[in-house]
Image (tube, grey):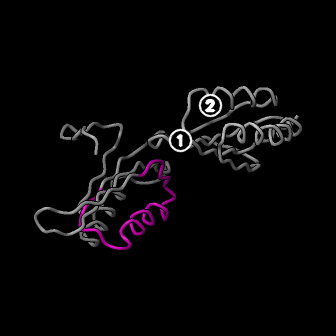
Amino acid sequence: MPKHQLIVTILGTDNSGILSEIATTVSEAQCNILDSRQAIYGKEFSLTMIIEGTQSAITKAECILPALFQRLDLLSMMKRTSHHEKQNLAHLFNVEFSGEDAAGLIKEVTGFFAERQAMLSAFRQRTYKDKATGKDNMQCKFVVSLPPNENVDDLESDLMALFTSLNVTGKVQDTQKKDPNENVTSW
C-alpha cells in the first residue's frame, strides 16, 4: 500500500509532556514520525514533523491532531506532501559575517546561497551599538549545507568577494575541520 505523508507544524508554550502526547496521538492514528525538528525560544517552542501512513491513517491524523493541539493550546498547520527526502547534512559549513548594519545585507548573503542551491539550516542575527563609533553594527551566523557538486574553494572565494563588496568581514568554517582559533563562547 502506498505511503502518504503529512507535514505538521506546531507553535506554543513549552511544557513537559507535549511531545509525548503528540507522539502517542500520531501512533494512535497508525502513523509514524519520519523526521522532526524542534526549537525552543525562551518559554515558547516550535516543532515541525513529517508523519507517514496509509491514506486512511493520514486522514485520521488530520482529524484527531487538531483536537489535541487545541486542548494543549498550540497553534498548528498541516499540509499533505508527496515525498520526503532527508536533508543532506553530510557537508555543513558555519558562515559568519559582521559589520555596520545596512539594509539588504542579509538579502545579499542569503541570495548568494540560494543561487547555489545551498540550504540554510540555522540562522542567528544580532545588532548592537559600536561603543567606539556609536554606529549600529550587526553580526550574523548560519549553518549551510552545500550540494555535492559545489566546489567549496570557489564558493569560499566568491563569498569573501561578496563580503568585501558589502563592506563586512566574514569567514566560512567547514564543520568537519575544527578551527583552532574558534571562539566557543555564545552570544
Residue with the most extreme left position:
132
Amino acid at circle 1:
Phe
State which region is magenta: 97-123
Above or below, 8 relative to 127:
above
Indicate whether residue 112 is drawn in magenta: yes
Position of residue 137 in the picture relative to residue 17 (left or right): left
Q: How many marks?
A: 2
Q: Residue at x 80, y 34 (%)?
A: 53
Q: What secondary structure is found at the residue carrying circle 2?
A: helix
Front-most of residues 40 and 89? 40
Q: Name the residue under label 2.
A: 18
Q: Can you tell which quarter of the image residue 64 is in? A: top right
Whether pointer 2 and pointer 1 mark residues with C-beta atoms closer than 8 Å, the reply is: yes
Residue 45, label in figure? 1
Q: Residue at x 49, y 65 (%)?
A: 115
Q: Can you tell which quarter of the image residue 131 is in? A: bottom left
Q: Residue at x 56, y 39 (%)?
A: 37
Q: What secondary structure is found at the residue carrying circle 1?
A: strand
Above or below, 138 relative to 39:
below
Circle 1 crowding by C-alpha within 10 Å: few under 14, some 14–19, many from 20: some
Q: Which of marks 2 and 1 is nearer the N terminus?
A: 2
Circle 2 crowding by C-alpha within 10 Å: few under 14, some 14–19, many from 20: some
The Cα atoms of the two marked residues, 2 and 1, are separated by: 11 Å
